[in-house]
Image (cartoon, rainbow, N blue to C red):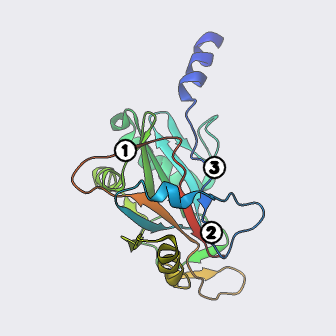
Amino acid sequence: MGQADNAIRRKEMETHKYGRTYHYPFSPGTTSDDRINKHYWQDIRLIPSLIHTEKLDGENNCLNRYGVFARSHAAPTVSAWTRQIRQRWQLIKNDLGDIELFGENLYATHSIEYRGLQQDFYLFAVRCKDMWLSWQEVQFYATLFDFACVPEVVQDVPRQTEQEYRSAILEQVGVVGSFAPHDVHTACHVLWKGLSPAMRLNSRWLSFPITYLSTCVKTM
């Protein structure tokens, strides 16, 4: 393969990586490094049906027809801790087409040790070309490719007023997370790492563009 072919190949692989998650301004665990969505209420009121999923403490991996990517999409990852998910990718790569699967890879332990994992990769988002798909579509592709989804933790939060919404979300904070999470330093149970909203369908298929900003509650 010549230099021109390599350049074309690199250009083809250039896809948008998964952006940083924006946090609720009332999130109790945010730091100065976190991005805050100060206009979350205006954004959320435009979404007809909303659920929240648990933010797991893993590596963000993307599976598309070009390979398995970590945070950078400059080149496929070859790290030792992605060996298993790269083996899974070999089985599905020819069926992905324009679909990109985003999930938390929990094979390696970071700050949280999960003692009750059923598998190492949990899907949280799916993109097709320049559109993020709805949660119902994420669940569809998870089933199609035999992956689990990240746990759903809050559904249909009351949204009559902003204060009602905040109170309902904060009531959920303080719950021990899924899969028996333990702090790697103290061995103590840990609370939810965070909650991330996702759009759910009612009677129609609905997707949203890549510029959509997700928002979460950070608890640690």
The residue that mark 2 highlights is: 109
**Residue 55 x %, y %:** 53, 67
Pointer 1 or 2: first along the chain:
2
Residue placed most toward the observer, 154 or 4 = 154
Tell me the SS state at disc 2: loop
Pointer 2 or 3: first along the chain:
3
The residue that mark 1 highlights is: 207
In the image, residue 130 sits, relative to residue 175, either above or below, namely above
Q: Amino acid at mark 1?
A: Ser
In the image, residue 112 sits, relative to residue 190, either above or below, namely above
Image check: 31 left or right of 72? right
Residue placed most toward the observer, 120 or 102 = 102
Quarter of the image for the N terminus: give it.
Answer: top right
In the drawing, what numbered circle is on residue 38? none
The residue that mark 3 highlights is: 79
Q: Residue drawn at (33%, 37%), measured in percent from left and top?
A: 95
**Residue 4 x %, y %:** 62, 10
Q: Amino acid at mark 2?
A: Thr
**Residue 133 x %, y %:** 38, 46
